[in-house]
Each structure stands twice: as structure tokens, then as C-alpha cells.
Image: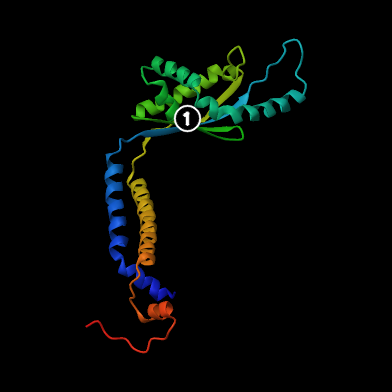
Amino acid sequence: MHLREYIALLLRYWPVLVVLPLLTAGLSTLTLLGRTPVFQTTVRLMVTQAPEPDPELPLPPLDVGTTWLTTAYILDDLPAVISSALFATDVQAAMAAQGYALEVPAIQGGLRVETTHRSVLLSATAATPELAVAMAQAAVTSLHEGGLVYWGRFPAGGLQVQVIDPPGAAASSQSLTGLVREVGLRVALALVAAVGIALGLAYLDDRIYHARQAERWTGAPVLGVIPEE
């Protein structure tokens, strides 16, 4: 089938190609505009295991390398710790000390972490900018004070948590650029689906629309065409 025939086939079912993307654009816009906005802030940390020196014995040079190696294993587990109910409970208590109340499931759903070597990017998402910033600060405090307790090590501590990028003002997740990008992506997917529907309808349609189609179906050359009018 030539490109011209594909174009003619799609034009034959143009209502599908127009209505489905337009309907998707309208419904997506209404849905996204009606969604409750959330706010997010981020804080960048440097997290390492604190050495545990023996006051009676000097640390050999090997312990420095061992500390960095152990830190790598700790940071592998950090996303699981940050999303745990135990950590969220400690964050809830730290937020309550600042005068903010938030449920544990909301804290678990609002905290995310990405690790790159010893660098940790912690993000906090909440319903208001103040809650997002308070959650990020409480998470840093809980990680610093709890330390290796979340790995079953006692007493608390054992981690060095250094803030290198403090949490800034929380930004809304709903922006015009984000709205246009998400609606555009959904419209593009709807257009692809519309093309698939049009091709499916053409496959099921057994009517003859042009001479080349008649030649393919009959196996005989077309000698002439009588205009419809």
C-alpha cells in the first residue's frame, strides 16, 4: 500500500482522528486543573558512617577505608529506611515539636530519596509549603539523631549527616509548563490510539473505494471506472 493510500484511509476516518484527541485534551485539562495542588522541597545531604574509635587504641588507616565501604552499604538501604513507618513516626514526632501535625501515611508518601555515592537528595511533598519544609527538616533531624538505630544498631547515632543544600521554598507541582506537557503527552497517545482505531476500522471494512483496491481483491486489471455521479 502506497503512502497516498494510507493518507486517504486516515482521511476517510478523520472524525476518529479529531474527536478522540480533542476529547482527551478536554478531559485531561479538567482533571489536572481540578487536582489538589501539592508542594515539594528538596534538601541535599552528605551522609557517611561515623567512625567508632576506641579511646584506648588509635585507629589504623584501614578503618578509614572500611568506614567508606560501610557507608556505601548503608546508603543502599536508605530509600527503604526513609519510606518506613518507623522513620515516619520519628519524623511525625519531630514535626509535632515544631507545631505541625501530619499522619504517618502522609509522611511515608511524601518522602522520597535519591542517592549518588555519599550524596543524598531528599524530597518532601505535602499539601502546603510550610508542611513540606517542616517535613524535610524533621527528616534530616530524625536521620541525624536516629542514625544506625534504623538498621538495628544501638545506641542511636553512628551517622554523620551534613546539609550541603538546605531546603528552599516549596514549589507547587501544578505549573503551566507541566500542565501543557502532561496534556500534550496524553493527546499524543490518544492520537496514536486513534490511528490504530482507524486502521482497524479500515481492515474490517470490505467496501471497495478505488481501482487499485479492486485490482488487489479480484486479481484482474481495471479497464475503466464509472464516476459515482
Residue ranking furthest to the left: 229
Query: Considering depth in this image, is 160 or 70 the residue closer to the camera?
Result: 70
Tell me what residue is drawn at x 53 percent, y 21 percent.
143
Residue 6 picture quarter: bottom left
Q: How is the image coloured?
A: rainbow
| Closer to the camera in the image, 16 or 168 | 16
**Residue 29: percent from the left, percent from the top?**
29, 47
Answer with the quarter of the image where residue 115 lies: top right
Secondary structure, mark 1, is loop
**Does 190 appear above or below 41?**
below
Residue type, label 1: Pro
User: Residue at the location (36% across, 51% down)?
Assistant: 186
Question: Quadrant of the image for the C terminus?
Answer: bottom left
Residue 145: % across, % down = 53, 17
Q: Can you identify the residue that label 1 sits on?
A: 166
Label 1 CA crowd tier, 10 Å (few <14, some 14–19, many 20+): some
Residue 16 in the image, given as x and y percentages of width and height: 30, 61
Q: Quadrant of the N terminus?
A: bottom left
Q: Is residue 68 left or right of residue 91?
A: right
Viewer-side residue, 23 vs 29: 23
User: With 37 as the anchor, is 51 left or right in this view?
Assistant: right
